[in-house]
Amino acid sequence: MKFRIDHNNINVTDLEKSVAFYQKALGLQEIRRKEAKDGSFTLVFMGDGITNHKIELTWLRDKEGPYNLGDNESHIAFIVDDFDAAYALHKEMGCICYENKAMGLYFIEDPDGYWIEIIPEKR
């Protein structure tokens, strides 16, 4: 029996804002979209075009207010081939939320407060 990772889920409050963020900040593209027949939810699967791993953005119609992420320190990490260009883009976007210069990496924050680790390809 073998398992392989397919996707991670992130619940979002503004689906189109989140799709735009993941496209601009990380170069992800929408792979597919599923909408509930009753309109209660929409799922958007985003991918990098390199691996088969996807991020599933889930929008729930009846969710009011922001998600409470509490002390959840889980995150998704991305390796980037041009760290300096990525850093400049994220600085311009104003989404860098934490830098660890000693380790040579930083984190960005998406519109719902989820952290994403940015790691240079060659460390």
Image (cartoon, helix red, strand yellow):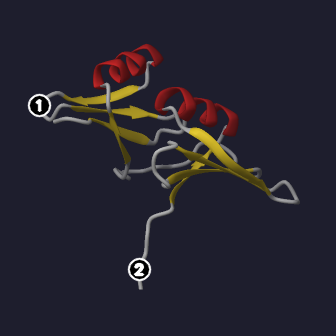
Residue 111 higher or lower than 61, as above or below: above
Mark linked to residue 51: none
Residue 122 place in picture, x, y as percent? 20, 35
Residue 77's image quarter?
top left
The residue at 51%/32% (across/down) is 27
Most foreground residue, 92 or 40: 92
Q: Position of residue 105 (x, y in %)?
A: 23, 33
In the rendered image, the vertical position of residue 117 relative to residue 97, given as above or below: below
In the figure, residue 80 lies in which quadrant?
A: top left
Q: Is residue 85 above or below residue 12?
A: above
Is disc 2 in contact with disc 1, using a CB cutoff of under 8 Å? no
Q: Which mark is residue 2?
A: 2
Mark 2 vs mark 1: in front: 2
Q: Residue at x 43, y 75 (%)?
A: 3
Mark 2 residue element: loop
Q: Is residue 12 visible?
A: yes
Using a 10 Å C-alpha cutoff, classify the residue at mark 1 as few (fewer than 14 neighbours), some (14 to 19) or many (20 or more): few
Residue that mark 1 sits on: 102
